[in-house]
Image (cartoon, coloured by chain):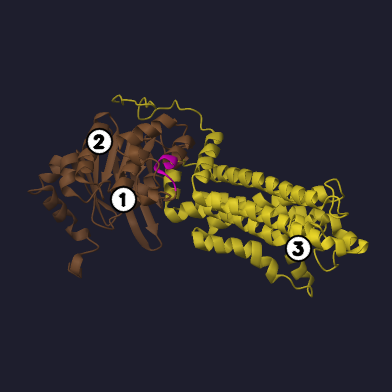
Amino acid sequence: MIEANGLTKRFGRTTAIDDLTFTVRPGQVTGFLGPNGAGKTTTLRMILGLNRPTRGSVTVDGQVFRDRSRGLRHVGALLDADDVHGGRSAKAHLAALARSNGISRQRVDTVLQEVGLADAARRRIGEFSLGMKQRLGIAAALLGDPPVLMFDEPLNGLDPEGVTWVRALFRRLAAEGRTVFVSSHLMGEMENTADHLIVIGRGRLLAAESLAAFVARADSLEEAFMTLTADSIEYTAGGSR
Amino acid sequence: MTRVTSETTPVSTPTAGTRPPARFGALVASEWIKLWSLRSTYWALGLGVVAVIGINVYSTLALRRLLPEWSAEARESYNYMNDALGQAPYLLLLIAAGIIGALSMAGEYATGMIRTTFVAVPARRSVVIAKATVISGATLAVGIVVATTSVGLTQVLLSGQDAGFAISNKGVPTALVASAVVVPVCALVGMGIGVLIRHTAGAIFGVFTVIVILPQLTMGTTYSWVVDLNNSTLWSAWMTLRNTPIRELMPAELFTWPVGASWLVLAVWPLVAVVAAVVVTHRREV
């Protein structure tokens, strides 16, 4: 369970996140939606203690994440597939992460197998395609078998097989009783995967309801999203508003 | 709460409290894996080791050819440390150590790996201290091997030539220990620079500035504060300690600080670097 309460973040004069209050519940996949620049990534980073809230707070299973000494058994997160050192092999990367959290070497092999990178385990990450890096990031998130998982645009660069696999993985993780929080711009994917949605625009909460309720606002998820966020779009192609 | 199926590491409930204790040793082991899974580590240290030992042996061989023409007085007053632990190759080793330290932090910041690291271990201060432990341990081992091998080999080459020095000579143990210790000292200072600068190229330039350029900028002997500044650089502290065996023969204006003060220099630099690294890393948003 992720609980944000009055979460606010300012960078200088700009308010990136404005008084966000929401709950991400276990046992379901929660989609995190919003136009570019809405503050999704900043929110995920605050949940993980990488950014400090200006005001308000956010807890994961009742505790501020940064107060924990080790993280992987509590939260698995894929924020950016490029947040890795390209000079290391996939296996060494995961082995270092696992060791820091007292997770066994066998578990590294298990997750590499699970994400389909067993054959590439000894290759340097710098040689990986984006899709392979996404798989590696998912492997890292799964390492600690955590009750809470967060993914920021996990489908970027994945091949069709990968997309199908990730969809099934998220469903399975949620069915196992875990909290699964996924940000994505792919409305079709969200419609297929999410049970619940949290929608933000310009750092403010626009909607927090079940997928069915949200879709019922219009004819489709995409249309409901476009209507709801119409006033919150910061960047528009061609500059027209 | 729904039961979570476990694989190799069981998760009982999403708020499970029973966990293996967070051990610092595990963080050290993790950082050890990180250090030795990068090619740059082998390149930098390998180059440093080969350069110091190779060049010192080579210059001692050259010295051996010159010795027969030297007077007894010349042999008596020569600083054999110049070939046993020559400045130029040692500078290369110190730069290599500094770069390894700098890359250990700047490499994580520049690639974004730092975020992955801090999600795995939110206790950031422990991460920095574990990194410092690994970096200093590995480079100290290198320093010990290089200093003893270089001194040992070169003095064996000079044996029977009525030249060189014995390990038991006055000041030689000091020179040896200082030469081993200055390697991890430079690595830790590099690590501090890596935290402050965060970009690999910038951090490497910072290492050069502190280890190489700072002693050059403060070569003047007119003002005493400039002399003090020079004496407080890592390079001059190491030179003072390395030259302990022939301290009486040194020109008066060079390396004017006592041995004790030079040890202090080698202690304060890394201490400040590690404290800065810990404090800044703890506070910074990444």
Q: How far apart are marks 2 and 1 (CA)?
A: 21 Å
Which residue bears the numbered disc 1? A129
Q: Give the magenta range.
A: A88-93
Q: How crowded is mark 2: few (under 14 residues within 10 Å), some or many (20 or more)?
A: some
What residue is at 78 percent from the left and 73 percent from the top?
B223
Q: What element carries label 1?
A: loop
Which residue bears the numbered disc 3? B231
Q: Mark 3 lies on which chain?
A: B
**The color chain B is rendered in:** yellow
Q: Distance between the residues labelled 1 and 3?
A: 51 Å
- Answer whether labels 3 and 2 touch (C-beta < 8 Å): no
Which residue bears the numbered disc 2? A169
Q: How crowded is mark 1: few (under 14 residues within 10 Å), some or many (20 or more)?
A: few
Q: Which of marks 1 and 3 is in front?
A: 1
- Answer whether labels 2 and 1 touch (C-beta < 8 Å): no
**The color chain A is rendered in:** brown
